[in-house]
Image: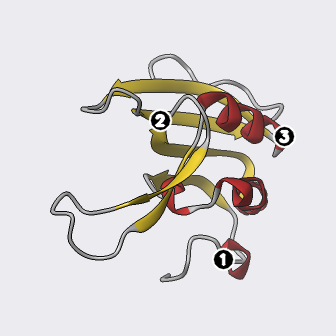
Amino acid sequence: YELDMRDLDELNDQFDRICCSFGLPYIAVDELPLWLESIEKRLASKGRIYLSTMIKLKSSAELVFANSGEGKGILTSYYSKDYLRKTLKDCGFTVEKEAFFETDSTDIQDYAVVASKKDQKPLEDNV
C-alpha cells in the first residue's frame, strides 16, 4: 500500500503489529489522538504497536530546516514523554516497553515504545 499515514481508515485489514519509525514528527501534536485511535482500530485483538520519535520536555511544533540551511523548512512535531504515554493510554493502549536514546542535541532524545491493546498479557522480557 502507498498512502498517507494519516489515512489508515482506508485500510480494512486487521494487523498483529504496526510499526511507525520516526513518522510521528509529521503528525501534528493535536492530531495524535485521532491517529492513534485509527491505529487501535486496525490492530487485531492481541495487536501491538511500535513507535519511535523524538521527544522534548514539552510538546511543540517547530519549523526545521536541512543542515545545509537551504530549501523550505518542514513543520516538525515534538512530543513530551508524558503526553505520549497519556495519549496512548487514552486511546486504548498499555505501554509495555520503552527506551530513551541520547542525541547530539541537549534538549531532544530519541524515544521508542511498544504498546499493546489494553487488557492483554504483557510481553516476555526476552522478546
Q: Residues within 10 Å of mark 3 (few under 14, many from 20)?
A: few
**Residue, disc 3:** 90
Question: Which amino acid does the dot numbered 2 rest on?
Answer: Ala
Residue depicted at 46% across the width and 43% down the height: 52
Q: Is residue 105 above or below residue 65?
A: above
**Residue, disc 2:** 112
**Residue, disc 1:** 7
Question: Which amino acid does the dot numbered 3 rest on?
Answer: Asp
Question: Where does residue 121 sit, x and y in percent of width and height?
Answer: 73, 26
Q: Label 3: state its secondary structure.
A: helix
Mark 3 in CB contact with mark 2 (< 8 angstroms): no
Q: Residues within 10 Å of mark 1 (few under 14, many from 20)?
A: few
Question: Where does residue 13 sit, x and y in percent of width and height?
Answer: 69, 72
Marks 3 and 1, how far apart at CA: 20 Å
Q: Label 2: state its secondary structure.
A: strand
Q: Is residue 53 above or below residue 99?
A: below
Q: Is residue 42 above or below residue 1?
A: above
Residue depicted at 43% across the width and 52% down the height: 22
117 sits to left or right of 66: right
